[in-house]
Image (spheres, grey):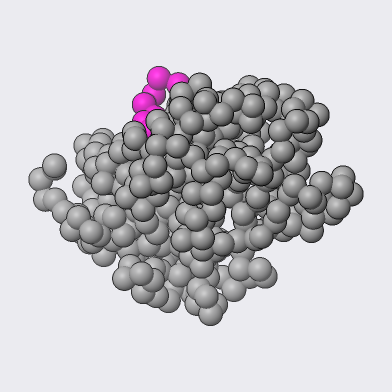
């Protein structure tokens, strides 16, 4: 640990609770984890509160001070192009390090990074996104290299998410992996036994996702229609847990294709219900191509389920192809992997046994918090601006 530990940390994110999504929940859990080991943590966000709190109001959420610096915009869009002055005033208040959380479009976080560096505040930046189409445009701005030259340490939530950021940096600096975390004790379920539940009358497939285009719910249904044609003798059902703006489109597709007899859409469910559903299932599907990590897939893997996903996603951090799931190159590859698991009970059981006997301890919050602290030490050691203002 560095001298002067524990420290006061500013977690900065465009999106935060009450919005629900990967960054929002991860930053909340990170804040609680850092606080549990003695650090002082405050969150700065452009997201308005449950009752419209904004304009700098400090709200206590889960015992963490949350600075609501957004504007009251339609649909609660997290934006405030005028936040710089107030950010500067507040970040001068004894903070030791700023931890900024980047998505593809994060104007509030970008401004906070500028302010933090102008104050000489050590800063680490976590990329929660797959840059994909945005990489050339971001590269043209030169912003990532400027941040690195100014002393901002870079990390990403998975190896696949780190690759495009490293391309933008070249040999200027290293991009490390700071994975998302989970409470392994909650999700790891060795008590389920060494074998999955019986498959009669169906093999149960399950996925948990927001019903948005990026998660690819309809392409997933198309993959499973191919699987039906490949192994018509194996009855299976799919449960899609979650909700989102594509729900009506997914429901319309299910009706139009006449597949309602094997597709169930119960909507968003509680964590205990999610665990119950996983305990009754046999295979988890993760169809997103541009998934930077895949918390839902990791939770299902902890519960014992073999995971079938794509090798372009961050699921490669915890799915080992052919060991506890499959990472396919294409949708056709996904269909073949699913068909293999449907027809090979022994294979499913072997993967299940691996998952319920080998917990992903390196992704437990205790390990992730330790890695986060090392990133803070790295940011403090790389400080190249004038001595930070206290």
Residue 120 appears left or right of 68:
left
**Which residue: 53% across, 80% down?**
51
Chain part drawn in magenta: 170-178
- Look at the image and tell me in which quarter the C terminus lies: bottom left
Relative to the observer, which residue lies in front, 345 or 311? 345
Q: Main secondary structure of the magenta part?
A: loop
Residue 56 appears in the figure: yes
Tell me if residue 175 is in the magenta stretch. Answer: yes
x, y percent for residue 237: 69, 45
**Which residue: 74% across, 54% down?**
246
**Which residue: 49% across, 49% down?**
279
Residue 10 appears in the figure: no
Relative to the observer, which residue lies in front, 292 or 347? 347
x, y percent for residue 284: 57, 40
**Which residue: 51% across, 60% down?**
273
Relative to the observer, which residue lies in front, 122 or 332? 332
Position above or below: 213 against 135: below
- Look at the image and tell me in which quarter the N terminus lies: top left
Tell me if residue 70 is in the magenta stretch. Answer: no
Position above or below: 74 against 165: below
Position above or below: 22 against 231: below
x, y percent for residue 194: 40, 37
Residue 40 appears left or right of 135:
left
Residue 12 appears left or right of 257:
left
Position above or below: 381 against 344: below
x, y percent for residue 248: 79, 58
Q: Identify the image quadrant of residue 345.
A: top right
């Amino acid at each position: 640990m560095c001298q002067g530990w524990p420290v006061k940390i500013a977690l900065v994110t465009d999106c935060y609770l009450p919005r629900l999504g990967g960054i929002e929940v991860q930053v909340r859990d990170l804040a609680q984890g850092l606080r549990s080991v003695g650090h002082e943590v405050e969150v700065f966000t452009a997201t308005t509160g449950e009752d419209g709190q904004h304009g700098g109001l400090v709200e206590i959420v889960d015992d963490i001070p949350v600075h609501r610096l957004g504007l009251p915009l339609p649909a609660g869009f997290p934006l405030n192009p005028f936040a710089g002055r107030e950010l500067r005033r507040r970040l001068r208040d004894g903070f030791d390090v700023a931890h900024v959380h980047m998505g593809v479009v994060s104007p509030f976080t970008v401004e906070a990074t500028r302010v933090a560096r102008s104050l000489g505040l050590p800063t680490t930046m976590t990329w929660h996104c797959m840059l994909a189409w945005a990489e050339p445009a971001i590269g043209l701005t030169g912003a990532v290299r400027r941040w690195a030259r100014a002393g901002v340490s870079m990390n990403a939530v998975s190896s696949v998410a780190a690759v495009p950021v490293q391309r933008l940096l070249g040999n200027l600096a290293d991009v490390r992996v700071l994975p998302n975390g989970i409470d392994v004790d909650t999700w790891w379920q060795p008590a389920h036994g060494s074998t999955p539940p019986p498959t009669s009358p169906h093999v149960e497939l399950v996925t948990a996702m927001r019903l948005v285009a990026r998660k690819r719910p309809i392409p997933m249904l198309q993959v499973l229609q191919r699987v039906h044609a490949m192994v018509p003798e194996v009855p299976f059902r799919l449960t899609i847990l979650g909700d989102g703006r594509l729900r009506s489109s997914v429901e319309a597709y299910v009706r139009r294709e006449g597949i309602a007899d094997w597709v169930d859409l119960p909507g968003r469910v509680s964590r205990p219900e999610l665990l119950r559903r996983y305990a009754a299932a046999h295979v988890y599907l993760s169809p997103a191509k541009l998934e930077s990590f895949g918390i839902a897939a990791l939770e299902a893997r902890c519960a014992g389920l073999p995971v079938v996903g794509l090798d372009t996603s961050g699921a490669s951090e915890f799915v080992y192809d052919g060991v506890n799931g499959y990472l396919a190159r294409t949708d056709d590859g996904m269909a073949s992997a699913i068909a293999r698991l449907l027809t090979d009970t022994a294979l499913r059981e072997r993967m299940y046994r691996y998952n319920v006997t080998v917990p992903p301890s390196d992704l437990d919050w205790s390990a992730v918090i330790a890695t986060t602290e090392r990133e803070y030490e790295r940011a403090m050691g790389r400080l190249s601006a004038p001595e930070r203002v206290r």
